[in-house]
Amino acid sequence: MIEMIENLLPYISGLYTLPWIVVGFFLTILIARVTGREKIDKIMKKIGLILLYFFVPVLLFRIFLNTTFGKKQIEFAIIVALIMFFMYFLAYLYAQYTIKKQKLSGKKKSLYLKTVLTNQGRSSAFIGGAMLAIEEWSVPAAIFMALVGIGLFAIIPAILSYMHRKESKSSKEETINALPWFLKLYPWYLLTFVISAIVLHHQTGITTNNFGEIGTLLKLYTAITIPAALYYVGAGIHPSDLKVSEMKKLFGLDKSAEKDDHWQWVRNIFTLTVLITPIILVIIFGALFVTKILPNPAWFSVIAINAFLPITSTNMFLIPYGIDKKSTAHAVTWTTLICVPIVVALIALFKIYL
């Protein structure tokens, strides 16, 4: 049994996990013909939370338990923190620039600013999690995922909450506490697994190899996380969203949508997340990598791929804080459709050549 599991592990790891996006997409279409799409979406939403709480943290625990968290890892964590700050600062500057260009004011200005800031958050847990299956990238990718989790579920909601309270105070509206408790808890819950693994390994030197057959079962359990997460991503792509008419509006080819604020907002968010942010990050860290200032190819690979990740669907939980629902939904959909093939190609390319 254990030998069979060990033989199976390579086939649910690394580049072998990537086709699960396609499997999730097509299999969901077939199942939806029987059950209906709404029922599948409700089930997949629950599966997403199960993956976030019961699989991703255990996977990170296993990775950090097998790693000596030393100077290099701390340096990379600092780099990631700086990258996240830069990304959101860039989003703020871009939002302010486009606000002036669109001549937005009052509530519409605030709504747009919060929507742009929030949608700089990327899908690190699901699509970015594919990097965890590649041994050379697993530790930096895990560091990136853990810090992005804090940003998405702690820092950004705190900023939105502050802005909402400020707006409510001036307009005398009732303040809200919109983020579900399980998402408020998530970043600290995730960090508990990471810190526990680092401390346990540092104090005892234990790795998963010390657990024998249980360690092999742990590897199997955590290895399932990546294809399951990628299946989840594929299942979340709606064929109904693949409309030529919407694509024309997104890229400004439909003249009837030129005066529509909604499609202008989606186009701006798309431009920021798919073009401006990744291009700037790749140029900066590509130059550092070429000049050997950033000598680790795994670091550059993880940074570059994370820069192209699509917007995370968990942003929809933050709509009650005053972000635009329709623009967020379309931005998530279209960045997923465009960025997933880019990410898959980059993973394959960097895995082979770096």
Image: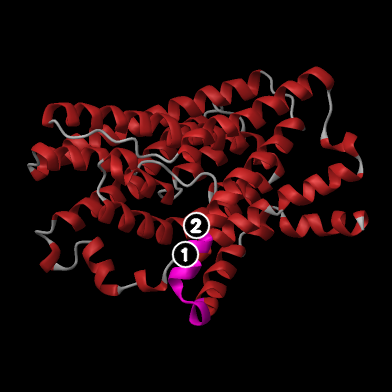
With respect to residue 258, does 174 lie above or below? above
* Marks 1,2: beta carbons within 8 A: yes
For badge 2, the amino acid type reads Lys
Which one is in front, 30 or 70? 30
* Majority secondary structure in the magenta region: helix
Q: Tell which residue pokes out farthest to the front in this image.
A: 174
Q: Which residue corresponds to the image point at 47% horizontal and 64% vertical from the top-left?
A: 41
Residue 354 visible within the image: no
- The residue where tag 1 is placed is 41
Q: Position of residue 5 (x, y in %)?
A: 85, 56
Chain part drawn in magenta: 32-45
For badge 1, the amino acid type reads Asp
Q: Quadrant of residue 104?
A: top left
Q: Which residue corresponds to the image point at 53% horizontal and 36% vertical from the top-left?
A: 186
User: Mark 2: which secondary structure?
Assistant: helix
- The residue where tag 2 is placed is 45
Left or right? Give the position of 26 relative to 102. right
Q: Which residue corresponds to the image point at 40% horizontal and 29% vertical from the top-left?
A: 155
Which part of the image, by quadrant, shows the C terminus? top right
User: Mark 1: which secondary structure?
Assistant: helix
Which one is in front, 156 or 127? 156
Residue 12 numbered tag: none
Q: Position of residue 138 (x, y in %)?
A: 66, 40
Does the stretch in magenta take in 68? no
Q: Position of residue 42 (x, y in %)?
A: 48, 62
Does the stretch in magenta take in 38? yes
Query: Label 1 neighbourhood size at 10 Å, few (<14), some (14-19), many (20+)?
Result: some
Q: Position of residue 16 (x, y in %)?
A: 68, 60
Which part of the image, by quadrant, shows the N terminus? bottom right
